Image: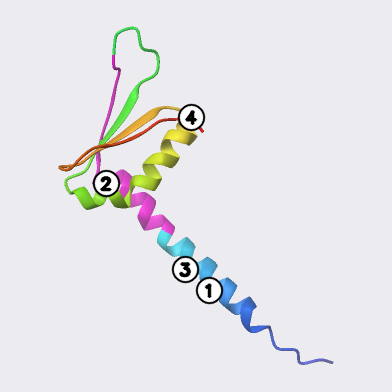
C-alpha cells in the first residue's frame, strides 16, 4: 500500500480550471444581458445581417471585445459593438 500524495502542480491545475469555469459563465452572461441587441441589413440586396450590440459604457465595449470577435467567427456574421466611445467592428473572416 502506498501513500502517494498528489503532486503540487496537479492541485493548481484543478483550481485554475475551476476558477476559469466559474468566471466564464458570468462573462458570457454579462455580454448577452448588459448589451442591447439588434440585427440589421446594410442594404436591401445584402444577404448577411450585421449584429449590433450596444453597451452603455465604453469600458464594456473593451471588456466584451474578445467575445464580440468570437461571436463574429462562430456565427459568420459581422458584429459591431457600439459604446459612447468609438465603435468596435468585428468581421467573420479568419
Spatial separation of the CA atoms under disc 4 and disc 1: 35 Å
Disc 2/disc 3 C-alpha distance (Å): 23 Å
Q: Which mark is residue 61?
A: 2
Q: Nearer the viewer, mark 1 or mark 2?
A: 2
Task: Find the distance from the CA under tag 2 to the CA under tag 4.
Answer: 20 Å
x, y percent for residue 17: 54, 66
Give the residue at mark 4.
93
Query: Is the residue 63 above or below the residue 82 in the image?
Result: below
Residue tagged 3: 19
Q: Name the secondary structure under disc 3.
A: helix
Does residue 86 sit above or below 58 in this rendering? above
Label annotation for residue 15: 1
- Relative placement, left or right, of 7 versus 30 is right
Please check the rendered image and state whether residue 31 is part of the magenta-colored stretch, yes or no. yes
Determine the image quadrant of residue 68: top left
From the viewer's perspective, tell me whether residue 24 is left or right of residue 83. right
Q: Dot 4 lies on which element?
A: loop
Amino acid at each position: 500500500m502506498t501513500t502517494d500524495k498528489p503532486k503540487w502542480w496537479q492541485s493548481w491545475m484543478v483550481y485554475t480550471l475551476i476558477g476559469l469555469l466559474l468566471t466564464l459563465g458570468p462573462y458570457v452572461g454579462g455580454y448577452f444581458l448588459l448589451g442591447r441587441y439588434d440585427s440589421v441589413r446594410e442594404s436591401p440586396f445584402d444577404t448577411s445581417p450585421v449584429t449590433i450590440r450596444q453597451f452603455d459604457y465604453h469600458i464594456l465595449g473593451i471588456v466584451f471585445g474578445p467575445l464580440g470577435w468570437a461571436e463574429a467567427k462562430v456565427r459568420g456574421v459581422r458584429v459591431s459593438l457600439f459604446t459612447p466611445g468609438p465603435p468596435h467592428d468585428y468581421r467573420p473572416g479568419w
